[in-house]
Amino acid sequence: MTTRFEEREGVGRIVIDRPDDRINALDPALVQSFGEAIRAARASGVKALIVTSAKKDNFVAGADLDFVRLATDPAPVIEALRAMQRVLDDLATLPATTVAAINGAALGGGCELALACDWRVAADSPAMRIGQPEVQLGLIPAAGGTQRLPRLVGVASALEMILASRRLTARRALRAGLVDEVVHPAALERAATDVARRRPKRKAQGGKTPAERAMTWLAPARRIAIDRARTKAIVESRGLYPAPLKAIEAIEVGLRDGMAAGLETEARLFAELATSDTAHQLIDLLLTTLRQRREAFDDLPAPRPVRLLGIVGAGFMGSGIAQAGAVAGMHVRLRDIDAPAVARGLKTATDLTADAARKGVFDRREAQRIVGRLSGAPDLSGFARADLVIEAVFEEIGLKRRVVSELEAVLRDDAVIASNTSALPIAEVARGARRPGRVVGMHFFSPVHRMPLLEVVAPANGDPAAVATAVAAGEAMGKTVIVVHDAPGFYTTRTLATMMGEAALLLEEGVRIDEVDEAMERFGWPVGPFRLMDEVGLVVGKHVADTVSAGRIGPTPRAVPLLVQAGLQGKRGGAGFYKYEGKKRTPNARVYELLGVSARPPHGDVVERLTLAFVNEAARCLDEGVLRSPAEGDLGAVLGLGFPPYLGGPFRYADANGEALRNSLRRLANALGERFTPADCLRDGRRFYQ
């Protein structure tokens, strides 16, 4: 069955259905059949029409990303977009009152299709999300989204939604004016039919309030909104991501010169972006992330579900993991040293839940259910039924071993114990355990509620069923899970520590702290290495460096140990590589005194040295079997560490630079030592992606 038009009691229905796809991704065949259904609706003479989906929990997705990912010539892209624009124009100009009955995700092209209707009725369900996420993929809306959205909700709101790639729940979309009614899923078609029968066609107002409409339609006021958005986009994109500025341009042209000019502009600009390396890398990352939900279980048995999750350690990390587990539907038992510590942990998890509800991530009723799944005590009461227990205590091997021993005394034999450690080898954590094969690593990233990555560590003699349980629990929490093999620092901490160490060696050569940080931030990292070390804390940083130093090649950096010895702790202590006074941050001159260095230019390019140190160490992790695949290496680097997304990750970066990268490594090895000797897979010229 395909997209079709049908009529019942004077009301037309277009049912969208791409039979070979579970999400109705827009491709040329679907666009053509949808256009035919619109023509049939026009010929029928119906006065009321609803547009609905045959898919469960999904309305219409965006464009087929494989089509965009493989695009090299703008011309066919523009032609495909014009075809889609014509179809949606036909929908918008139907004499009938048109209503989109949105039963689930309506993102990208699906949102644009809904915008072409007169009214929108949405199901109040967890699956319902609506928005224009194209900018996140290095693209812009191009089936009328940059034109119809500002005319509906106002230019200021549209700019914010498009540039931030907002995905709104039904209730938030209602408040924003993006949808007109929110109803129970069972009443969706009935409510949409009622709206189509009793409401007239409408003209877009440009916002709900007079101020919003003035900003949309009056050129001087609109200029303020456009200029403000452009300035912010320039700062945030750092010139590395062109999509935000292209989206602003399309919106500006459309409101200034009319809808036709705006549609032509958005098609042209989309085609430019769709054939760019940046968009291709960002789309590949998304597709790799989606595939990873399945591939994380490669070579693992079927997991057992986690109904009761235990957490030992109710600090910020433990509380964040507890909240993520409760959101995933698990009952969570939290334990810490005393009742006040447990109470603080439960309050943190409750506050995280309340804040998410305020932001529309889920409604208040669901927030109450999540909090109801949380409990705690200063002992292990309630842990006997746990399927999985995650310890999130301080990074000290003796303490972690003691926790494992205490847990084994009360847990079932088939329960899994996971250590939330960023660097300690899991085999060492499990030494002395009665069931060491049931001990795995689950390295969460902070803050847990924001960071999308989970690194599951599989020890050499670990039980694959235990690893599978950890992977399944992580995915239930909404994380992208990579599975790595046990070694000091695993993958993410090891590669990051290598780059940090190279930054410290640059400092010892006399390169300024802020010069290094600013160079890496311009390159696309969220923060520079010295700022990050201060954020993490220098005592923690020294502990991590000591843990991963066993396999280090080359000189041992002196900076962090010297600073810790001098009492400098990082941002929380008020001084580290920088001095912190309120919101002011300045490079700490004392660091240069402690190291006995004066300012000198670096040997080689700062960005090149740090980037190649990171990429080469990632490749060594693949050679040594710490990583299972280049894809997991790229996901770990981008989602966990902030490796610049527009580069796709260290392995895609290596593919893109090929022989030039190998030559640069050899040159640096000749000048600086064996730490830059190309890893085997780089030296051999291996391509990591076809």
Image: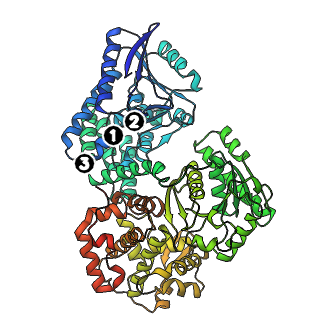
Q: Amino acid at mark 2?
A: Pro
Task: Give the residue at x 21% y 34%.
Answer: 79
Instruction: Say if mark 2 contacts mark 1, CB within 8 Å.
Output: yes
Q: Amino acid at mark 1?
A: Ile
Badge 3 or badge 1: first in the primary sequence: 1
Q: In the image, is residue 323 above or below residue 313?
A: above
Q: In the image, is residue 358 above or below residue 411?
A: above
Badge 2 or badge 1: first in the primary sequence: 2
Quadrant position of residue 378: bottom right
Q: Nearer the viewer, mark 3 or mark 2?
A: 3
Marks 3 and 2, Cα distance to the nearest angstrom? 26 Å
Disc ID at residue 275: 3
Instruction: Say if mark 3 contacts mark 2, CB within 8 Å.
Output: no
Q: Nearer the viewer, mark 3 or mark 1?
A: 3
Q: Nearer the viewer, residue 442 or 28?
A: 442
Find disc 1 in the rendering and name its residue.
Answer: 251
Badge 3 or badge 2: first in the primary sequence: 2
Q: Amino acid at mark 3?
A: Thr
Find disc 2 in the rendering and name its residue.
Answer: 150
